[in-house]
């Protein structure tokens, strides 16, 4: 395996926004509109899956979900998502935006990013009023977010990130043998995502993306298995009590990450079925209307043996 | 407290080198020589403490220890230590260098550094042959080092780093009330460093450095207590069996960090006296002659409550 395929920045930047109810439908803006907006962050549309409620775009750098009055856009790598965000806010009009959140998880290779969160924040504050926070220590995993408008109106989501996957499935995901069918089968996707329509893509040389829709429900999974920076993320509006727990436990058992985070609007602790992990840290950001954004960081219980990596 | 005093990059870059035995004494090069070399990384000499065997310079950015045929230089902040290293190797002559190690611990604010380790490495490899390694994951604490020559001849040291200090002493170190005498008393330095001569400096608005010498033994302690990036490091040639364990345990109990690392030539696990911590990860880099460089990462056992930080 070449050195260039050993690293990839999986950690996503994320935009979630909801429009005022009187606005025209976001879905009516058309593919060309989204193509232009995404081009600002060097991101391309690879495919599209639609349901009655939602258009799910699979991107060269993660995913875009568009409903009538809201959207969720996540991009990975060294994309400058902030450029697309600025473009969308200016194009839609700041006054049309009921609520917006812009988030960046701590990057694995932060020094390779073309902007810091604080710099993105300065751009956003020229357009929108809002509050920004960081949860977690700078020397570990942390979440940074900017919130504007009626944040109680943002889509209630759960986001999970897994780091340093290990074992047979991790090896398979780094191999030449992999296929979309093989991954679906090994992840037990048919059972875990029962009733969902799936759109998947296998990247070359490595990487796998999945968008899934089932009525109002959406689910996305991104795997960057690169040896030195392996990372798997999922995002969904399913709650832990409504199908997500079984998915989390199955993915943990199959992917066997060293550590993982979950962040979302669901206060419940998801890990009681995955006893090989212990809860290392948790935090809550109180939002309006009694809602909260909860983050939790888990790590394997056993002492990890670190191997020297030649540079 | 102003925002500018909430962050400081404590994590050090470190040079250790040993000259061929026929070389003239490093100590004879004189203060002006070291002043010029240190200026390459924007570092100044604040004071000097000498014993029969060693000159210990307290620097504006950490410490320099010089023996007859070897030196240890550590700098923190956003210093470009690599510039001083290149200057020293060129000035002393690559053929005069018996062994050299250049190390960078993962920085707390990596994206603010003016070079990455890989870039420093490219500079070093123009001057010296050697091997480079990383131990630890990129999303957590990791150690990066370049080793050249007879690495068994490097000074056997232990380096300890503590992150996110908490409690009364941490509060005191962030207060206007602090003094060098007050810190020495609260850290119990007279007892812990019995027989050592001390040179200390209190930085404005925050920060404390200590160099200490006792015959062949050296010890240095640097405290950057800034709320959002608090960090305390020590380095010494004392072994865990020879006085260091008592110091480690006392500092852990008084400074109460969330996590800490120890790296060095001493295979022993130091933590059995500090039961509030669990060993999260360990690694060994095998060197020549049965020697090894051992790193260990500890974290508090209890789940940490993370508080949102407004940005």
Image: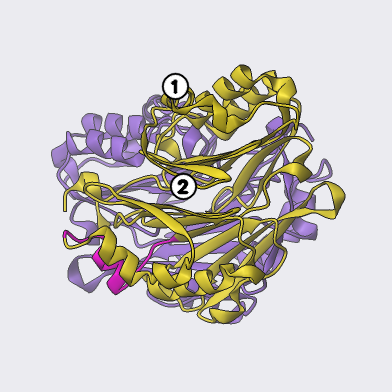
Chain colours: A yellow, B purple
Residue A11, disc = 2
Q: Is residue A166 magenta?
A: yes
- Crowding around mark 1 (Cα neighbors within 10 Å: few <14, some 14 to 19, many 20+) is some
Q: Vertically, is A11 above or below B239?
A: above
Q: Nearer the viewer, residue B79 or A180?
A: A180
Kind of element beneath mark 2: loop
Q: Position of residue A289 (x, y in %)?
A: 86, 50
In the image: residue A47, left or right of residue A214: left
Q: Residue at x 46, y 74 (%)?
A: A250
Q: Vertically, is A89 above or below B93?
A: above
In the image: residue A248, left or right of residue B100: right
- Viewport quadrant of the N terminus of chain B: top right
Q: Chain of mark 2?
A: A
Asked if residue B243 can be seen in this view, the reply is no
Image depth: mark 2 or mark 1 in front: 1
Q: Position of residue B81 (x, y in %)?
A: 39, 35
Q: Is residue B16 magenta?
A: no
Kind of element beneath mark 1: helix
- Viewport quadrant of the C terminus of chain B: top right
Q: Position of residue B104 (x, y in %)?
A: 39, 47
Q: Which residues are magenta?
A: A163-176
Q: Nearer the viewer, residue A239 or A20?
A: A20
Which numbered disc, 2 or 1, marks the residue that appears first in the sequence? 2
Residue A36, disc = 1
Distance of label 2 from label 1 (alpha carbons): 23 Å
Q: Chain of mark 1?
A: A
Q: Are marks 2 and 1 in contact (CB under 8 Å)?
A: no
Q: Position of residue A196 (x, y in %)?
A: 48, 60
Q: Vertically, is B212 above or below B55?
A: below
Asked if residue A137 can be seen in this view, the reply is yes
Q: Residue at x 37, y 65 (%)?
A: A165
């Amino acid at each position: 395996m070449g050195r260039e395929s050993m690293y990839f920045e999986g950690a996503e930047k994320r935009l979630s926004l909801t429009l005022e109810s009187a606005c025209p439908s976001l879905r009516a803006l058309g593919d060309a509109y989204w193509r232009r907006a995404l081009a600002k962050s060097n991101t391309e549309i690879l495919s599209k899956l639609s349901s009655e409620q939602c258009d799910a775009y699979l991107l060269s750098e993660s995913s875009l979900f568009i409903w009538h009055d809201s959207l969720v856009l996540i991009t990975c790598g060294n994309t400058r998502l902030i450029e697309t965000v600025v473009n969308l806010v200016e194009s839609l009009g700041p006054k049309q935006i009921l609520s917006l959140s812009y988030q960046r998880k701590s990057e694995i290779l932060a020094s390779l990013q073309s902007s810091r969160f604080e710099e993105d924040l300065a751009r956003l504050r020229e357009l929108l009023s809002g509050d920004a926070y960081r949860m977690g220590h700078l020397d570990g995993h942390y979440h940074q977010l900017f919130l504007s408008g009626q944040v109680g109106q943002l889509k209630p989501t759960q986001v999970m990130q897994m780091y340093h996957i290990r074992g047979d499935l991790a090896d398979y995901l780094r191999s030449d043998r992999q296929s979309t069918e093989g991954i679906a089968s090994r992840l037990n996707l048919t059972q875990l995502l029962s009733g969902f329509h799936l759109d998947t893509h296998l990247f070359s040389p490595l990487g796998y993306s999945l968008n899934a829709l089932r009525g109002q429900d959406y689910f996305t999974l991104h795997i960057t298995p690169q040896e030195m920076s392996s990372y798997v993320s999922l995002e969904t509006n399913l709650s832990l009590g409504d199908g997500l727990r079984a998915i989390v436990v199955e993915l943990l058992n199959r992917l066997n990450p060293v550590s993982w985070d979950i962040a979302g609007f669901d206060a419940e602790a998801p890990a009681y079925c995955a006893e090989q992990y212990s809860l290392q840290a948790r935090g809550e950001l109180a939002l309006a209307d009694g809602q909260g954004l909860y983050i939790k960081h888990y790590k394997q219980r056993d002492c990890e043996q670190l191997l020297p990596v030649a540079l």
